[in-house]
Image (cartoon, grey):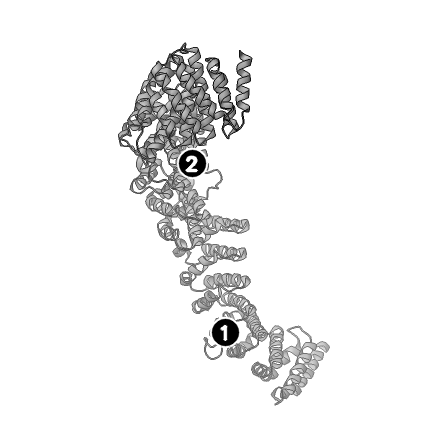
Amino acid sequence: MAAQGAEAAEAAELGRALGRLLPGLEADSKLGRRRALEALRRELEAARPEPSGAADAAAFQGPWARLLLPRLLRCLSDPAEGCRALAAHLLDLGLRRAARPQDALPHLLPALAARLAGPEPARRPPPEVCEELRLALVQLLGLAVSLGGAALAPYLDDAVRVLRCTLLDPFAAVRRESCRCAAALARATPDHFHMQSESLIGPLMQTISHQHWKVRVAVIDTTGTVIQFGNGKSVDDVLSHFAQRLFDDVPQVRRAVASVVGGWLLDLRDRYSFFHKLIPLLLSCLDDEIPETAQLAASLWEKVGLQWQRENEGELKDKLDFATPPPPHYPRQEHRPVLGCRELVFRNLSKILPAVCHDATDWVAGTRAKATQLLAVLLLHAEDHATQHLEAVLRTLCRAGADEERAVLASCTRAAELVGTFVSPEVSLKLILSMLRRSSTPSSLLVLAAVLRGCPRDALQPHLKVVAGELAQAYICQESENKLYLERLLSCVQAVIEVCQEDCCGASVQLMEVLVTLLALSGAPDLCAKVQETMDSLAAVENVADRQGLFQKHVGSLMEWLVPTQGDWTVHSVELAQFSVVVAHAGPALGDALQHVVPALRSCLQPSRDPQMRLKLLSLLADVLLRAKDTVDSRGQFHSYLETVTKDLLAPNLQWRAGRTAAALRTAAVSCLWALVSSETLSAKQILEVQEALMPQVLSTLEEESQATRLMACCIVNAFLKTSGVVIDLEKFTKVYPELLKRLDDASNEVRAAAAAALATWLRCVRDGGRKSACQGDVQYLYRELLVYLDDPESCIQDAVLEVLKEGSVLFPDLLEPEAEAAAHKHRSPDHCTRLLQHLRAAR
């Protein structure tokens, strides 16, 4: 009784104090009002804080409360900012200590609405100009919501009107506090909030792209609560905004989207109506770059699947009782989703897929990347049920495969591999190959390669020959010389070899045709290296040593594939390039294909054919002949074709014709002849046959404009003389040295030196062939001409000619000595003549 009396006395004292201070709130001066408010704060803060205290009851529930609360609310509009701040603080203090705070709501909510929203919701700026005070007032609203609970329902209009304005406040902290307040309001008035929830969606969606990430997170969380307790139809209004937040740079924002969408899929009242719209958002988070976000999304998605599985247990009874194990070729790096998740995707795939396919070709790169990632996830869930949507999926993948973004290409490849894994090759390959026949593009080849990589070996094996045969068709393997196209085509061959392994033996000829075409069309060294590595891989699965063994095995088939078209070849023909590749890379295997190679060359090297093509083939022939023992003569059968090579391949192209192209052809033909003669493949008899057939043409090429041609011609004449000079007909023999003598006046010292070497060989032939007496006049003439070059400006030529004269001095030293003595007096420097004379006298 004593305690109750003390509390009553204290309440009476506080009441008297408040009674004295209330008139000060109506003072005309700002200072007076402020002093009154500060005195009120001191009195209230000095009172006991328990809500059940008598003093508080007197202050906020008795007759004084009817006088104090309206005056404090009027102070919220005070011209002085300090007074408004004190009033807000006192109201906060009063609400926290009042035993029945809901009694203040009829006066508080309209006052807050007037101060924060004004008479019209769209009014800007708000009546309260101070940011910190707006924040305090929103916090006061939040306190009223948390304390008032369901009693706030009659005042829901005012609260929502306030939030619609404060959610768009320029001050970021006000927006965040408004989000918390809106979520609390939704939870506090679940029976009435759904009638007002839609009016908050607009301001929330205007704020969802705010520059502060914490505001964006708050908006997403609040939207989830507002729709959860409000009108589910608003899901349609927020989906596009949530989808945009999946591209947010801040991981917390993307995590908030995953959390909210997962919550809707689990708890939204009419969630079944929105499955096809919400599932893509959550599945898009499964590939988030932040592991925590991806794990959260995966956890929520599994819960969704298990919950739906429980809710539809009767319908899924057979599938649950007789659960099928994962396919034996299921991707190792993937975790198979639970049955509920797979069923949800399968049942909604027809509604989800069109939008995904559309976004996969969007103009924004990020959208394309997300869409292709989502497509792969959908295919992983759908498994073999994707077959009924396969045409649309493949068409989308072919379009997305043309993208330049690596992320898009990676997702596109992953999706195509899943198609190969789950869909029968009989179906998938039929559609893809049909697309390739209509239009062969790098993207379609990318999809085909990925599908092949995803196929199980046993499923792909029956279709191996069909695939290899299609790849070898001209409309695919000869479609383009673009490097990207060729790389994608190579990846198809690599995929076949990788998957089928030893089974490739049945289609290795077609695969070799594709690889040969790739080498023919590609000019990039790195791509050529990859093609050769692929040939090595094919050789390994075919159990041959290397790619040389591969050519050994298939060179006949390759030639039979190419040679029938040789009548139509030009320098631009792909077949010519393919033929060149086979000849250049076959190595020893070329010795087994001479019956194909030589007739093809004979036909293509006739003067009536394309000059540029002939030039290319002659260069190829020169390279092969230079390694004759390891190429055309690897089986020792080249001699059977020597006459054809000499008379039908080289002779027509050594004939003089006007024009630079004809000169280039003669140079190439001389190169072939030099390669043949210097390859050490021909016997002396065979070289004699070549000499008898080609010596006149070779001598005529000594006058060519090309230095290289003249040099090789000198070397060829020298080789002819060394091998068979002693048996040459005398008339033909004596026609050689004048042509060589002319070359001593050549502009090139290399040609002059080669001509001098050939003259020395000619003189040896005179000595060794028993023609000394018959050639005395020619030798004497040669002595006289050669002595002139002992005074040549070039010392190297002087030395070379001196050696020629020494070599020939054994024939007629008595004729040479007086000629040398006479020449010595005419030379600027008689040194070389003196050395020659010393040699002659020493020999004598």
Q: Would residue 272 be found to the left or right of residue 45 on screen?
A: left
Q: Residues within 10 Å of mark 1 (few under 14, many from 20)?
A: many
Give the camera-side residue of 840 and 632. 840
Measured as percent of width and height from the top left, residue 486 is found at: 39, 38
The residue to which callout 1 is attached is: 162
Residue 633 visible here: yes
SS state under label 1: helix
Measured as percent of width and height from the top left, residue 18 is found at: 65, 84
Measured as percent of width and height from the top left, residue 528 is found at: 43, 34
Q: Outermost residue toward the right?
A: 2
Measured as percent of width and height from the top left, residue 143 is found at: 57, 71
The residue to which callout 2 is attached is: 327
Q: Which of the two labelled residues, at mark 1 and mark 2, occupies the earlier sequence position?
A: 1
Residue 678 occupies quadrant: top left
Give the camera-side residue of 684 and 744. 744
Q: Residues within 10 Å of mark 2 (few under 14, many from 20)?
A: few
Up the image or down, 656 lies above or below 283; here it is above
Determine the CA span between mark 1 and mark 2: 58 Å
Residue 683 visible here: no
SS state under label 2: loop
Up the image or down, 800 lies above or below 382; here it is above
Q: Which amino acid type corresponds to the residue marked 1 in the rendered image?
A: Val
Q: Would residue 802 be found to the left or right of residue 312 on screen?
A: right
